[in-house]
Image (cartoon, rainbow, N blue to C red):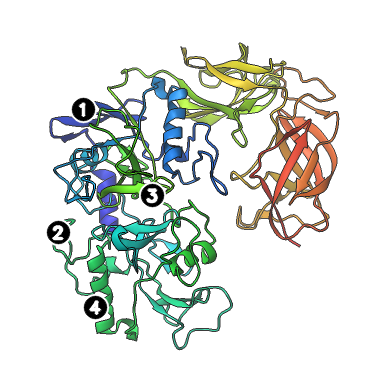
Amino acid sequence: MVKRLAEWAALAWVLPWAHGAGTLTLSADGLTIYDSANNITWLADGNLAASNRFGLPVCAGSNSQPCVNASGSMNYPSAAAWVAAMNAASYLGNSDWQVPTTPITDRGCTKVGPNGGSFGYGCTASAFGSLYYNGLRINAPNTAVPIPSNSLGPFNNVQPYLYWSQTSMGSSGNGAFSFDTGWQGANTLTHVMYLWPMIPGKLAGTPAAGNGLEVNPGGATVYDPQSNVTWVANANLAASNSMGLPPCQSATSPSICVNLDGGLNLDSANQFIANMNSTGYLGQKNWQTPAVDANCSGFNCGGNASPMGELFYKQFGLSAGAAAVATPNIAVGPFHNIQPYLYWTCQGAAIQNACEAAGPVANQEWSFSFGNGFEGTDILPNELFVTAYFVGSRPATPVPTISLVANAEGENPVIAPNTWVEIKGANLSKTQRMWGQPGDFGPNNNTLPAALDGVSATVNGKAAYVYYISAGQVNILTPPDTLPSGQVNVVLTNNGESSSTFSVQAQALSPSLFVFDGTHIVAQHFPSYTDVGPATLFPGLTTPAQPGETILVYANGFGPTSTPVVSGSVLQSGSLATLPDVKIGGVDAAVGSASLIGPGLFQFNVTIPLNAPNGDLPIVATYNGLTTQSNAVVTVQQ
């Protein structure tokens, strides 16, 4: 049935979908959707923040400043900052994007809270509710995006959503744990979520275990010695075995039921467990809903009192804000990349109104679930997904717009001469490719291309060299000419249509290390020239570095060299005036040489410290007082 749902979601949206008196119409460039019923224009990408952070950093550590998780989720202050950054960049030519709104009163909702706010299912007066129920015509508690069969360690069918616990949180509801972000908190009892049954302790016949997960004979259960519990291996058992519960006809009927995708309200989850025990499922009669620690809320809740958190953080090795499994990027109406989880929405009198200064209660804002159509509230530090719209429609003929100009590695929004830079935005190119086709490099293949397929860019009025083009991103090498310290203008031209000027900070250096996957540096063993990295990065191709070994590290934006660079030349070489300082795992590493070996490409010969421990170690290079990105790592193995 999951397969049939996925096919339906992918194929059912060929024409603009009528809802009420309006339609959802995809723009010619595929980037926005006009909702004529509400006179608003949505982002077509339901998780744009995962691919375009508009200059906000990736979340790490305590996250005291606005940031975006790699999955695209973020807390509410970050959501507001992300939309503000989108407006500052005039994304798609608009500077009035907003977080979708929710009114405090909605007669369609199934519930009314103690402060008079409407919540629950059937809420259609909000922007998200109007979209879910009327625009996309999804019936609660159905998910917008079915999750296909998956494996996570010895488990299968883990859902990137909230799971019930047995722990009451009093008037706040019942404890729950998110396998989409690692958040532990309370949820109202009528919310339709998932259930992962377990048994306390170790079953007879379980193999001897160290600290890792142990699969029991037959493969139907898994023992976790960290929290001393035995799990059902199928993390969404209810989707394939309802234990005699009837199928849900709606979000509220019957009162005890299992939804098509395995979701249940709390009463149904309790009855499901009772039926497992009465029938002796797998020969056991001590099945339980997992507990959570009532004294711990938010992230990093684990230990024996919170076995789901122990699984997430210890056994799966996930960090706060990470998703246990990926959501498929399928079509949902004219949208794509919608996450079947909670989205932030702010309080507003009407869909076309701006967000109000305060939410429904102190330290909370509204949320809406595309996992089941539930509208409620969440505390501001929780991490949900974000999308946006603006009131009105876009012009029929889109023009190129720039939303971000930054160092191509680490996305530091500071550029420098002869540095690889990324330009992000919309309508930047009609084609997608990198340089390398016949004729790209001019006469005798010795001149870098200043344009590809009609796409070009200028930095401070001078032509840059174009390496990669696509609708949403163009990568360039800035000209080697000295840039003034301060703001400079970048303009991109797509087949005669020029963007507005985009102002970006410039300076003499913008150092960064090239990385394969956002963190692991581009480096090679010497003299074999094979790639450095964990064996899992590119199986059969990457291997860790060893203590005492010299590796070749590749870098960007380190400035002028002993040999002046000829603008546009494919041949670039020369040494830095002094060697950069490199630290690996916080320890000084010897640097043998530092040279420019190709267009904008630096190579450092670096020796791994003899006392370097095993693992992914932070690597930072410092030159003339400036340092490379803080999240780069090199894999070391004795």
| Residue matched to label 3 | 328
| Residue matched to label 2 | 249
| Residue matched to label 4 | 275
Callout 2 touching callout 3 (CB < 8 Å): no
The answer for how far apart the CA atoms under marks 2 and 3 are is: 26 Å
Callout 4 touching callout 1 (CB < 8 Å): no
Q: Quadrant of the N terminus?
A: bottom left
Left/right of residue 626 with respect to residue 355 in the rendered view: right
* Percent coordinates x, y for residue 600 in the rendering: 71, 28
Callout 4 touching callout 2 (CB < 8 Å): no
Does the rendering let one see residue 435? no
Label whose residue precedes the other's in the sequence (3 or 4): 4
Eye-nearest disc, 3 or 1: 1
The answer for how far apart the CA atoms under marks 1 and 2 are is: 30 Å
Eye-nearest disc, 2 or 3: 2
Q: How many marks?
A: 4
Mark 1 burial class by Cα count in 10 Å: few <14, some 14-19, many 20+: some
* Percent coordinates x, y for residue 325 in the rendering: 44, 56
Label whose residue precedes the other's in the sequence (2 or 3): 2
**Residue 360 has which mark?**
none
Left/right of residue 71 with respect to residue 110 in the rendered view: right
- Residue at coordinates 51% horizontally, 40% vertically from top-left? 67
Of residue 143 and residue 531, the one placed in the foreground of this image is 143
Callout 1 touching callout 2 (CB < 8 Å): no
